[in-house]
Image: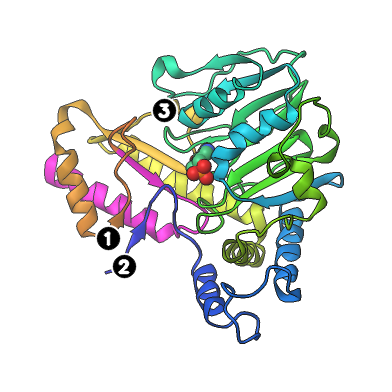
Amino acid sequence: MKKHNFYAGPSILPQYTIQNTAQAVIDFAGTGLSIMEISHRSKEFTAVIEETQALFKELLNIPDGYSVIFLGGGASLQFAMIPFNLMRKKAAYLNTGEWATKAIKEARFFGEVEVVASSEDRNFSYIPKDFRIPTDADYFHITSNNTIYGTEIRHDMDSPVTLVADMSSDIFSRPVDVSKYGVIYGGAQKNLAPAGVTFVIIRNDILGKTERQIPTMLNYQTHISKGSMFNTPPCLTVFSALQTLKWMKDQGGVQEMAKRNAEKAAILYTEIDRNRLFRGTVAKEDRSVMNICFVMNDEYKDLEKEFLEMASSRGMIGIKGHRSVGGFRASTYNALPRESVEALVEVMKDFEQMKA
Ligand SMILES: *Cc1c(COP(=O)(O)O)cnc(C)c1O
């Protein structure tokens, strides 16, 4: 039976990425060696990392003056590296969920943190709108897509100070005006590659301004000056990321991804709003296009398990909601085909027929 992969991360990747990675594990670029056993300094691998950087720049239309680097440690290590490298005295954060909360916790190790607004009062079910970004902050940090709660800031906001965004779960889902950001970062395991590599897009002129001593490996300048090759990068994962970038380019780039993602999200949200059994969990204007959360209406609450069983009998994988929200979450990343969303909607309709 066909599997419909709605996992939140690691998550669905294009078949193109999986096939080419499998091939390179056996024989990489005609070298007769596996991508797993070739030196990261070989000309074949150097070409991979350079092309990955170049495609990042091309697909996201990254202006001059920015670097793209690939690191280990996940997005979670960036929660500490950002204040380590950028905070002189004070930073501002928008608290829109668990990942933002974790980022705030790390920043507090380095200085004063002003949380400009939080949606914790209603279980992070909306994006705060009326907040003031303090002009004496060294930077302002946002989480563009809240993977757990299913809210998203789907525009590039103006900020009087350097804007820093965790885009782990919506990078490459739409065109981004990179010039509005000082840093965009994320783990690759949502829209790009298997787990193991973290991307950081950074405007060069914001670095080197703190007096703090920064350990070599935690200093962005180390990795920028060595083209992500100061130490051994996660070679296999970078190779996979490159395949996904090539696939995206071939499909029509981020414009096309945005169009498809909007269509998929509309199909599912329309059904959530129509179906008598279900309802959405977040403010409509803040709904994520990548992680679609919904629950059963109160009078049908005890049918949750039965719905999950029926969905799984029809090939749906990974739609159980995160424990902080409950109910269901369908992640509709770039590689998820529209047919998978349509198949989920079918199950929701059939279940309603049976029960309501
Ligand atoms: C998954 C995720 C993270 C954590 O990424 P790791 O690479 O596991 O550290 C951080 N932020 C957001 C928005 C995420 O979706």
Residue density around tag 3, few if under 14, some if 14–19, many if 20 or more, within 10 Å: many
Magenta highlight on residue 352: yes
Provide the residue span drawn in magenta: 328-356
Q: Is residue 69 left or right of residue 352?
A: right
Q: Quadrant of residue 163?
A: top right
Q: Which residue is mark 3?
A: 282
The residue under label 2 is 2
Q: Is residue 279 visible?
A: yes
Image quadrant occupied by the C terminus: top left
Q: Residue at x 86, y 44 (%)?
A: 65
Identify whether 223 is placed above or below 5.
above
* Residue type for callout 2: Lys
Q: Are marks 2 and 1 in contact (CB under 8 Å)?
A: yes
Residue drawn at the location 70% of the way across and 61% of the way down: 52
At which x and y percent is residue 160?
Answer: 78, 20
The quadrant in which residue 205 appears is top right
- Foreground pick, 270 / 201: 201
Tag 1, which secondary structure?
loop
Badge 2 or badge 1: first in the primary sequence: 2
Query: Mark 3 vs mark 2: which is more N-terminal?
Result: 2
Please, which colouring scheme is shown? rainbow
Viewer-closest of 213 and 95: 213
Residue 289 appears in view: no
Q: Position of residue 31 (x, y in %)?
A: 65, 85
User: What residue did someone put label 1 on?
Assistant: 315
> What amino acid does circle 3 point to?
Val
